[in-house]
Image (spheres, grey):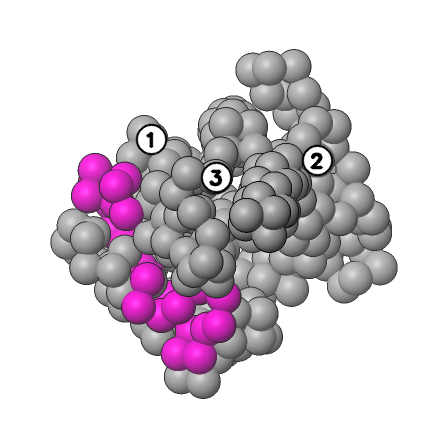
Amino acid sequence: MRLVLSSGIVLVAMLVLVWALQRKLIYFPSSDVPDPDTIGLSGVVRVTFPTTDGLTLHGWFVSRTSTPEFVVLIFNGNAGNRAHRAALADALSRSGLAVFVFDYRGYGGNPGTPSEDGLRLDARAARRALLARADVDAARVVYFGESLGTAVAAELAAEHPPAALVLRSPFASMTAVGRHHYPWLPVGLLLRDRFETLERIPRIRAPILVIAGGADHIVPTTQSRRVFEAANEPKSLLVIPDADHNDDALFTGRPMIEGMLRFLRHLR
């Protein structure tokens, strides 16, 4: 009886600990943002903009032309900051696109603490800041979400449809990802931030490109396919063979960049 009681106490203590620390298991912000020139990114305009709950966020607008084909609003994954997407911004801008990459609250030296509700406000604020620019055509704004950012981008797209939506390594929901990695935990009861992408995808009225890694160990390819299958037409699926979640192939790999450009230019 004592053994059962002790085991129960340990289990409850573990669940309480997971509940209290879960956001530290989801969000991995980095505050150190180097000068863009030092990491080989040129054509950068530094941008600051407010959120409706009183924070000031920072981002970079990158363009090498006054008449970009599209303007890509990037929603980062759960780790690092905008400097870690510099290579992606560089590749897209060299291909005739303009790029706006920003940091969520708590990332890149920004104030605040990340949460699903907070990232929702940050996404709306970034869109407002982008559309406020005189050199941005709202009809040519594309949302690009990476990993966690796919859920942020998808929710914004359901509310404010873009010209197109590109989702790299999207997942069905945070609950589904949690159950995949921690099948012994009651994830559905513990999670605060759920990021229910699969529920929101059918409400999106915009062309969608889903990009997945064929060997993704963090977001299973099956989940990305579920997101694709739930999307409305027109839609496209690009699976990069043998690519894992954090491989260069899914950040700046040539097949991914070329696939994205083909998709966008077909829309044009």
The answer to whether residue 211 is magenta is yes
Which picture quadrant has residue 239? bottom left
Residue at image position (69%, 53%) is 80
Residue at image position (21%, 38%) is 203
State how far apart marks 1 and 3 are (Cα).
Answer: 30 Å
Provide the residue designation for mark 1.
Answer: 160
Q: Position of residue 97 (x, y in %)?
A: 49, 55
Placement of the C terminus among the 4 image quadrants: bottom left
**Which amino acid type corresponds to the residue marked 3 in the rendered image?**
Leu
| Few, some or many residues within 10 Å of mark 1 (<14, 14–19, 20+) | some
Residue at image position (60%, 52%) is 3
Label whose residue precedes the other's in the sequence (2 or 3): 2
User: Which element is circle 1 on?
Assistant: loop
Provide the residue designation for mark 3.
Answer: 190
**Which amino acid type corresponds to the residue marked 1 in the rendered image?**
His
Label whose residue precedes the other's in the sequence (2 or 1): 2
Label whose residue precedes the other's in the sequence (1 or 3): 1
Tag in front: 1 or 3: 3
Q: Is residue 39 visible?
A: yes
Q: Is residue 7 visible?
A: no
Q: Which mark is residue 106?
A: 2
Closer to us: 163 or 196: 196
The answer to whether residue 229 is magenta is no
Per the rendered image, the range of residues in magenta is 198-223
Reply above or below: 61 against 132: below
